[in-house]
């Protein structure tokens, strides 16, 4: 059994760790509220805009000239993988790496795959196996729609040039503080809706459906990417808050076990001292 000083030092050390994890939990909880509001406020707009574009494109007479809807034979694929810049958030970042590998193995094993990383952690994971075309980890230092739009513009330009035949986004979608949903979304080409029921045919489109699509598609793609990043940020804070909560609880349990061990060791030490005193007294009397 460890001596009393070693146990006491370990109790002090674990107590310090518990203070740190508890503070990190509170910081993440504070950041989560702001990130959650940002993600939830954009999500309905982004989803509705995407639905409108898919519905209109399914009814348009000729969208073959619209480059962002062009279906091609898939040879080269770009995957936009989104993680965080920091750790201590459980399996949040590792799961993105696993999902990336799963997508490549199941869908693009015979294709050329390149990765655009947003987040230092996924960049560290992906660069060991894939070609990284861009690392946009600094985006989190000033996360605005304008800065996200710059990345989306580059992706759209590369797709229009034919550098990529398909673009997908992999990220953690925020559901609640305790749950993040690993999500895979196709960004390009834009897929038309299977049904026309979502758009009423009596609508009059001005100037025409094709012109509306030409103007709306770039905006929709930029918002889709920005929504994914905001979702990932909210999911990161939720994952970190949950992880630090568990770490704090584990530290509390460990301190309890150490105190019990300390008390047993102290009791054994006192018992030994009493036995030594009694033994010494008997020796004197004898």
Image (cartoon, rainbow, N blue to C red):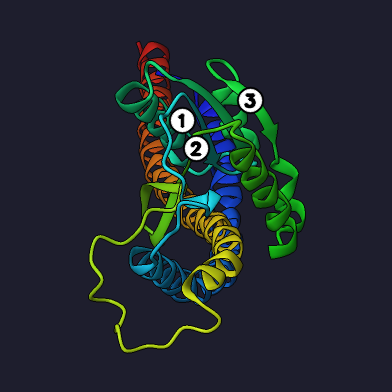
Identify the residue position indicated by label 1 in the image: 97
If the image is split into quadrants, where does the C terminus sit?
top left
Provide residue 29's location: percent of width, then percent of height: 53, 65
Foreground: 215 or 103?
215
Asked which quadrant contains residue 200, the reply is: bottom left
The residue that appears at 30% across and 83% down in the rendered structure is 201
Q: If you read the primary sequence from the N terminus, does the residue marked by circle 3 or circle 2 appear first? A: 2
Please say if the residues under marks 1 and 2 sit with CB atoms less than 8 Å apart.
yes
CA–CA distance in space, label 1 to label 3 = 13 Å
CA–CA distance in space, label 3 to label 2 = 17 Å
Of helix, strand and loop, which one carries label 3?
strand
The residue that appears at 52% across and 67% down in the rendered structure is 213
- Label 3 crowd (10 A; few <14 / some 14-19 / many >=20): some
Foreground: 162 or 92?
162
Foreground: 28 or 117?
117
| Numbered badge on residue 93 | 2
Identify the residue position indicated by label 3 in the image: 132
In the image, taking residue 224 as reference, residue 265 lies left or right, namely: left
In the image, taking residue 156 as reference, residue 236 lies left or right, namely: left
Provide residue 65's location: percent of width, then percent of height: 52, 52
The residue that appears at 46% across and 83% down in the rendered structure is 205
Asked which quadrant contains residue 122, the reply is: top right
Of helix, strand and loop, which one carries label 1?
helix
């Amino acid at each position: 059994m460890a001596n009393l000083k070693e146990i006491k030092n370990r109790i002090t050390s674990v107590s310090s760790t518990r203070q740190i994890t508890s503070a990190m939990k509170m910081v993440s909880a504070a950041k989560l509220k702001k990130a959650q509001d940002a993600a939830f406020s954009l999500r309905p707009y982004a989803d509705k805009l995407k639905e409108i574009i898919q519905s209109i494109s399914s009814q348009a007479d000729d969208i073959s000239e619209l480059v962002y809807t062009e279906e091609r034979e898939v040879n080269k694929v770009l995957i936009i993988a989104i993680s965080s810049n920091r750790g201590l958030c459980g399996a949040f970042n590792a799961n993105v790496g696993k999902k990336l590998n799963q997508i490549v193995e199941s869908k693009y094993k015979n294709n050329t795959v390149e990765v655009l990383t947003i987040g230092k952690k996924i960049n560290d994971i992906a660069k060991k196996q894939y070609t990284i075309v861009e690392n946009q980890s600094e985006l989190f230092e000033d996360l605005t729609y304008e800065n996200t739009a710059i990345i989306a513009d580059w992706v759209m330009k590369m797709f229009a040039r034919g550098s990529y035949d398909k673009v997908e986004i992999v990220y953690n979608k925020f559901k609640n503080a305790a749950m993040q949903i690993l999500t895979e979304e196709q960004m390009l080409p834009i897929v038309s809706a299977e049904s026309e029921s979502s758009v009423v045919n009596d609508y009059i489109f001005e100037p025409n459906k094709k012109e509306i699509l030409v103007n709306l598609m770039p905006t929709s793609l930029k918002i889709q990417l920005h929504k994914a990043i905001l979702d990932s940020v909210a999911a990161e804070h939720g994952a970190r808050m949950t992880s630090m909560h568990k770490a704090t609880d584990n530290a509390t349990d460990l301190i309890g076990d150490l105190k019990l061990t300390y008390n047993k060791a102290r009791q054994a030490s006192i018992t030994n001292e009493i036995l030594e005193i009694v033994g010494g007294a008997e020796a004197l009397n004898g």
